Amino acid sequence: MKVLVVGGGGREHAICWALQKSPKVQALYCAPGNGGIAQVAQCVPIQVNQFEEIGEFALDHAIDLVVIGPDDPLSEGIVDFLEAKNIAVFGPRQNAAILESSKVFSKELFKKYNIPTAAYESFDSYDEALRYLHTQQIPIVIKADGLAAGKGVVVAQSLNEAEKALHDIMVAKIFGNSGDRVVIEEFLSGQEMSILSFVDGKVVRPMVPAQDHKAVFDNDAGPNTGGMGTYSPLPHIPQSVIDQAIETIIKPTAAAMVSEGRPFRGVLFAGLMITAEGPKTIEFNARFGDPETQAVLPRLKTDLLDIFLAAVHGHLEHMDIQWSDEAAVCVILASEGYPAAYPKGQPITGLDDVEDALVFHAGTSVEEGRIVTNGGRVIGVTALGKDIAEARGKAYAAADRIKFQGKHNRTDIAKKALV
């Protein structure tokens, strides 16, 4: 089969890495790809929002399956567009991708179907939102309604911080139209957990759970990022809690989307908080998470292409999906200044010196034959081991070998799982 992956980050590198292991994949393309993806797939210079060009490429090259990586094209209807051309595509249609592209939609869905989540109110008026804010307890969570590259959520530790976040989102419009509406919700305390699931509409097949590290600095300090590292499994979280989250949140959400006439096909990503009252929903994403994918897919033993095809054709219930017992830890190497402004074009060295680890490129490109930085999150280093401690040791040893000017990374990824 010929497969085209749409996207150019660490998530797409991990997807391409997993797909190229399939004996059924005859040709693998990635649009636009990056410096690392070029080592496992043929990169084509088409951007993720160029639907016409993606469709033409798929038809011209007799592509059997298109896999959509990022959230933006999903929310803009790329799946509907390609399906209209009779191109098989893995990912949710636009009316199902709204689960991620509108925080207000998802919160209202949770309320309607009694899916556990934080108490909230939504606003399209800045003045009303500000008045409501002054009646609430601190800390509090402010969310832009629309997509914001993983940065549209502020956990405010003071009233001043909350007021600034509200002003930035709704008045200064730092996220553009994504800030036309906001969700203000109660702060949930506890352990975070991410569960990604393959879904074919009605059937939900959960992947192994992971835990992301959103804050830029050690000990969860500093602003939120798209994710500074992740690990799987979660030895400190009981299986009974994981099962509870699947049965009370993930499966009911998939069923709710069917009831709403918006059946979800693709990867349903549940961001969860394990509170004293049990698991509650923070948010849902409509695609593979980044960097969760870089820790989850290396543990997958089943052919990823087979799973994608089963989901597309509604046959997931017949799939026997197997996972490795090994642990995986992914450490993100970021550019100086990230998640704020950062330089690009810094040469990266040491990539060939990495041993016993996987190197997933996120923000890289090739200039004059050498790999250089081209994003905020540059590289994800994933290592496998018999347990978290071994995987963690290997990941950090490999990460230390990779150098570029201004490189920074957290040093405490997966530390809370060392039990």
Image (tube, rainbow, N blue to C red):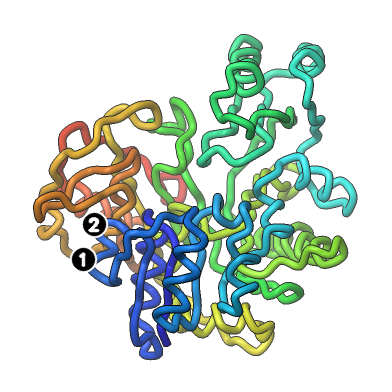
Contact? badges 1 and 2 (CB < 8 Å): no
Q: Secondary structure at mark 1?
A: loop
Q: Secondary structure at mark 2?
A: loop
Q: At 40% from the left edge and 47% from the top edge, which residue is drawn?
A: 229
Q: Quadrant of residue 181?
A: top right
Q: Is residue 89 above or below residue 27?
A: above
Instruction: Say if residue 419 shows up in the picture.
Output: no
Q: Which mark is residue 35?
A: 2
Q: Is residue 369 above or below residue 267?
A: above
Label 1 and label 2: CA atoms lie apart by 20 Å
Q: Is residue 46 above or below residue 325?
A: above
Q: Quadrant of residue 386?
A: bottom left
Picture coordinates of residue 44 (x, y %)?
A: 32, 65
Question: Which quarter of the rendered picture does the N terminus lie within?
Answer: bottom left
Is residue 367 left or right of 323 when viewed as pictured? left
Picture coordinates of residue 93 (x, y %)?
A: 67, 63
* Label 1 vs label 2, nearer the camera: 2
Q: Looking at numbered disc 2 in the image, what kind of residue is underneath it?
A: Gly
Picture coordinates of residue 318 (x, y %)?
A: 65, 89
Q: Is residue 108 above or below residue 28?
A: above
Q: Which mark is residue 412?
A: none
Label 1: few (<14), some (14–19) or many (≥20) C-alpha neighbours in 10 Å: some
Residue nearest the observer in this picture, 169 or 277: 169
Label 2: few (<14), some (14–19) or many (≥20) C-alpha neighbours in 10 Å: many
Residue nearest the observer in this picture, 393 or 395: 395
Q: Looking at numbered disc 1 in the image, what kind of residue is underneath it?
A: Asp
Residue pointed to by mark 1? 356
Q: At 24% from the left edge and 36% from the top edge, which residue is drawn?
A: 344
Q: At 16% from the left edge and 34% from the top edge, which residue is drawn?
A: 405
Q: How many marks?
A: 2
